[in-house]
C-alpha cells in the first residue's frame, strides 16, 4: 500500500508540474478524454522512473555535492532535484515515453512543484502502518 501511495503522489506531482510549467510536457493529445487515456500510463511510468532515479542516483550525487550543499546552505539541493528531473526526462525519452523537460529553469520549477505536491498528497493519503 505504501508503494501505491508513493506512486500516486509522485504521479500527481508530475501531472501538476506538466500543467503549470510550459517547458515540461508529454507528447500526444492535449485536451479531453483522449489526453487522459494517452497520458495515464506514461505518467505512471515517469513517476516510477523518477522514484528509481531519486532512490539510487540522487544519494550518490548528494554525497559528492556535500561541500556545495554546505556552501549554499542547502540551496544546491534544489539544483540536484532539477538535475534528477532532467535525468528522468532523458531516460524516459530513451525508452520511448514522450516526456520532455526543456531546460534547467523549467526543471527547477518542476522539481519544486513536484516536491510540494508529492508532500501534500502523501500527507493526505498517509498510510497508518
Image (tube, rainbow, N blue to C red):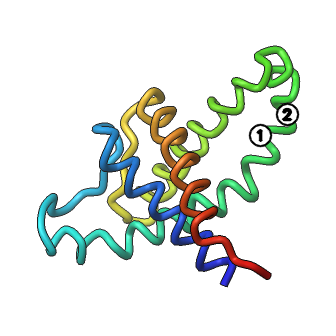
Viewport quadrant of the N terminus: bottom right
Where's residue 118, x and y in %? 56, 56
Q: Image quadrant of residue 2?
A: bottom right
User: Between residues 80 and 17, which one lies in front from this camera angle?
Assistant: 17
User: Between residues 79 and 1, which one lies in front from this camera angle?
Assistant: 1
Above or below residue 127? Residue 75 is above
Callout count: 2
Look at 80% across and 25% down and name the residue there: 69
Above or below residue 109? Residue 50 is below
Q: Image quadrant of residue 62?
A: top right
User: Between residues 17 and 117, which one lies in front from this camera angle?
Assistant: 117
- Mark 1 and mark 2 in contact (Cβ < 8 Å)? yes
Q: CA distance from mark 2 to mark 1?
A: 5 Å
Look at 75% across and 79% down and name the residue there: 128
Residue at the spot of label 2: 64
Look at 45% across and 65% down and name the residue there: 95
Where's residue 57, x and y in %? 73, 51
Numbered disc 1: secondary structure? helix
Q: Please give left or right for residue 61 compared with residue 29 in the image.
A: right
Q: Please give left or right for residue 2 compared with residue 97 in the image.
A: right
Residue at the spot of label 1: 61
Amino acid at each position: 500500500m505504501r508503494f501505491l501511495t508513493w506512486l500516486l503522489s509522485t504521479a500527481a506531482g508530475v501531472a501538476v508540474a506538466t500543467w503549470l510549467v510550459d517547458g515540461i510536457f508529454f507528447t500526444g493529445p492535449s485536451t479531453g478524454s483522449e489526453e487522459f487515456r494517452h497520458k495515464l500510463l506514461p505518467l505512471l511510468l515517469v513517476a516510477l522512473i523518477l522514484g528509481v532515479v531519486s532512490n539510487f542516483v540522487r544519494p550518490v550525487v548528494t554525497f559528492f555535492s556535500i561541500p556545495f550543499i554546505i556552501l549554499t546552505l542547502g540551496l544546491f539541493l534544489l539544483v540536484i532535484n532539477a538535475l534528477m528531473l532532467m535525468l528522468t526526462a532523458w531516460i524516459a525519452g530513451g525508452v520511448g515515453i514522450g516526456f520532455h523537460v526543456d531546460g534547467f529553469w523549467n526543471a527547477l520549477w518542476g522539481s519544486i512543484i513536484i516536491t510540494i505536491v508529492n508532500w501534500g498528497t502523501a500527507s493526505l493519503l498517509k498510510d497508518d502502518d
